Image: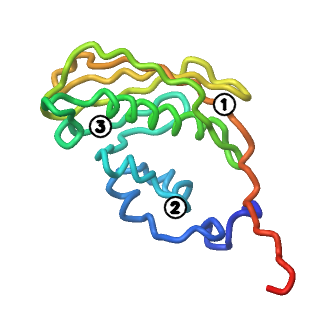
């Protein structure tokens, strides 16, 4: 365990219990300890993203169309982009390994068709898994298996930053 973690595995100074959030997203059991410190992220929970598979080479998740639509009732392109970035960033972070993080530096998405109901499913496949850069392609399909969106994300891999501490002030 690195110096940023307490004996229980929680990040020092990070409040909260993310068991419910991790469970609702159906994070695979073998990855729950990895996310116990930080959860899956507020946006993942708000969008209703549910993971089916998570690895550096391939990650899969679903997301409901309902609740993630734009004003005319179609799946919002930003929701598709968020699903794609979530899958690609999680996959890149798994590839990076302990003590490292993935930082998205490029995301592009082409929207092929509208989705207005049901679920969409994103399948993220590694294009390149390098020491410092990863690229993944994400194909998002509707409930009928028709391609809704194709995205590509590039992530930069970096060492986890040291926690910021406040300097002591005299007389405090």
Position of residue 153 measured from the top left corner of the image (x, y, whole percent):
52, 24
Position of residue 150 measured from the top left corner of the image (x, y, whole percent):
37, 17
Position of residue 14 measured from the top left corner of the image (x, y, whole percent):
58, 67
At label 2, counting other C-alpha atoms closer than 10 Å, the crowd grade (few under 14, some 14-19, many 20 or more) is: some
Which of pointers 1 and 3 lies earlier in the amino acid sequence?
Answer: 3
| Quarter-of-image position of residue 82 | top left
Which residue in the protein does label 2 denote? 36
The C terminus lies in which quarter of the figure? Answer: bottom right
- The answer to whether the residue labelled 3 contacts the one labelled 2, judged by CB atoms less than 8 Å apart, is no
Which residue is the extreme one toward the right? 170
| Quarter-of-image position of residue 143 | top left
Front residue (pair 104, 135)? 104
Callout 1: SS: strand
Which of pointers 3 and 2 lies earlier in the amino acid sequence?
Answer: 2
C-alpha distance separating marks 2 and 1: 23 Å
C-alpha distance separating marks 1 and 3: 25 Å
Residue plotted at (84% across, 86% down): 171
Which of pointers 2 and 1 lies earlier in the amino acid sequence?
Answer: 2
Residue plotted at (27% across, 13% down): 112
Callout 3: SS: strand
Front residue (pair 80, 6)? 80
Relative to 89, is 128 on the left or the right?
right
- The image's mark for residue 62 is 3
Front residue (pair 71, 75)? 71
At label 1, counting other C-alpha atoms closer than 10 Å, the crowd grade (few under 14, some 14-19, many 20 or more) is: many
Which residue in the protein does label 1 denote? 156
Front residue (pair 166, 102)? 166
């Amino acid at each position: 365990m690195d110096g940023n973690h307490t004996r229980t595995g929680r990040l020092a100074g990070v409040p909260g219990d993310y068991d419910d959030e991790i469970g609702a997203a159906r994070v695979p059991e073998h990855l729950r300890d990895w996310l116990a410190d930080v959860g899956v992220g507020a946006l993942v929970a708000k969008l209703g993203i549910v993971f089916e598979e998570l690895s550096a080479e391939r990650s899969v998740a679903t997301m409901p169309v309902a609740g993630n639509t734009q004003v005319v009732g179609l799946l919002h392109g930003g929701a598709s982009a968020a699903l794609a970035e979530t899958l690609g960033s999680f996959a890149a972070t798994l590839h990076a390994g302990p003590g490292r993080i993935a930082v998205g530096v490029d995301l592009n998405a082409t929207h092929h068709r509208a989705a207005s109901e049901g679920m969409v499913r994103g399948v993220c496949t590694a294009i390149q898994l390098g020491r410092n850069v990863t690229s993944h392609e994400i194909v998002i399909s509707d409930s009928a298996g028709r391609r809704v969106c194709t995205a590509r994300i590039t992530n930069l891999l970096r060492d986890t930053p040291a926690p910021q501490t406040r300097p002591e002030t005299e007389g405090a």
